Image (tube, rainbow, N blue to C red):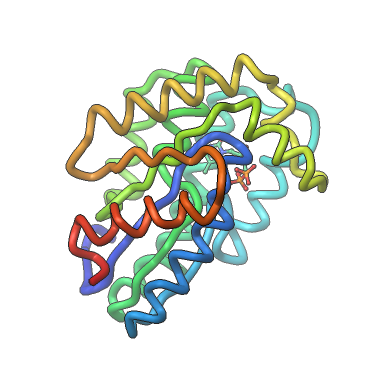
């Protein structure tokens, strides 16, 4: 599963409502315009089995799962997604754009909910063993992001249910992840106009040589 293939694996990370989904769509259009085969996917989910696990994770009461059980469910979903969707697409030479990946587990389950970071990294090494070529960390004030998220509605609010201070801790965790791994990660100012955020993302992707 660790074979890099010929494709490019890019992940988007950030607090709930940071605008990842919109930006992922725009970035996919930029790659398509550059003549690349591109797939858009997300976690938890992105394959039929992982989408089934997703429903267990994002619906229901905040206290539904312990942090440790969450870690196992997210990792199980990630493994299925990797096997069925990500690895085959990379092997075929596609650009894979993924909304969230292991950095979300580091932020939400380790920094946010107190699981040992070592457990997250050990499971990642054992069962996933694939890091993104580039991770775009969308950085925005969680109050602004939560307002956007609430406006979106839907029944998937379990993590928003942990509250604003939880989200503020996540922001700090994502910033620390980006800072600790600057070769892989680019920290993107995601406040304000989506057009301007998209331009910052394109610049970061081009800077790493993934877009002309
Ligand atoms: P997502 O659909 O990306 O939510 P949003 O669009 O609000 O950003 O992800 C669902 C929730 O799952 C989100 O609140 C973050 C959480 N999550 C984790 O806690 N750990 C993980 O490893 C992943 C991938 C997501």
Q: Is residue 191 left or right of residue 34?
A: right
Q: Position of residue 79 (x, y in %)?
A: 44, 53
Q: Position of residue 18 (x, y in %)?
A: 56, 41
Q: How many numbered discs?
A: 0
Q: Quadrant of the C terminus?
A: bottom left
Along the line of sight, the residue nearer the viewer: 7 or 49 = 7
Along the line of sight, the residue nearer the viewer: 140 or 173 = 140
Determine the residue positioned at 50% across, 60% down. 24
Q: Is residue 179 left or right of residue 149?
A: left
Vertical relation: 46 (above or below) 34: above
Vertical relation: 26 (above or below) 208: below
- Ligand 1 picture quarter: top right
Q: Is residue 116 left or right of residue 160?
A: left
Along the line of sight, the residue nearer the viewer: 181 or 60 = 181
Determine the residue positioned at 50% across, 47% down. 76
Q: Is residue 52 left or right of residue 150?
A: left
Along the line of sight, the residue nearer the viewer: 97 or 127 = 97
Determine the residue positioned at 41% across, 72% down. 30
> Which of the 4 image quarters holds residue 178?
top left
Q: Position of residue 171 (x, y in %)?
A: 48, 25
Q: Position of residue 168 (x, y in %)?
A: 55, 19
Determine the residue positioned at 82% across, 48% down. 154
Q: Seen from this angle, which residue lies furthest bottom? A: 35
Vertical relation: 3 (above or below) 120: below
Q: Quadrant of the N terminus?
A: bottom left
């Amino acid at each position: 599963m660790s074979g890099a293939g010929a494709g490019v694996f890019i992940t988007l990370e950030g607090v709930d409502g940071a605008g990842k989904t919109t930006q992922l769509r725009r970035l996919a259009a930029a790659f398509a315009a550059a003549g690349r085969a591109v797939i858009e996917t997300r976690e938890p989910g992105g394959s039929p089995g992982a989408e089934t696990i997703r429903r267990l994770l994002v619906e229901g009461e905040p206290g539904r799962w312990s942090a440790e059980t969450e870690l196992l469910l997210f990792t199980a979903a990630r493994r299925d997604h990797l096997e069925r969707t990500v690895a085959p697409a990379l092997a075929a030479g596609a650009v894979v754009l993924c909304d969230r990946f292991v950095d979300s587990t580091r932020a939400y389950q380790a920094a946010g909910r107190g699981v040992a970071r070592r457990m997250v990294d050990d499971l990642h090494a054992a069962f996933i063993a694939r890091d993104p070529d580039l991770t775009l960390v969308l950085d925005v004030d969680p109050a602004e992001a939560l307002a956007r998220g609430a406006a979106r509605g839907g029944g998937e609010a379990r993590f928003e249910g942990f509250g604003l201070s939880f989200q503020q801790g996540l922001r700090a965790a994502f910033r620390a992840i980006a800072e600790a791994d600057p070769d892989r990660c680019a920290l993107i100012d995601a406040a304000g106009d989506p057009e301007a955020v998209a331009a910052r993302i394109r610049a970061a992707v081009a800077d790493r040589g993934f877009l002309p």
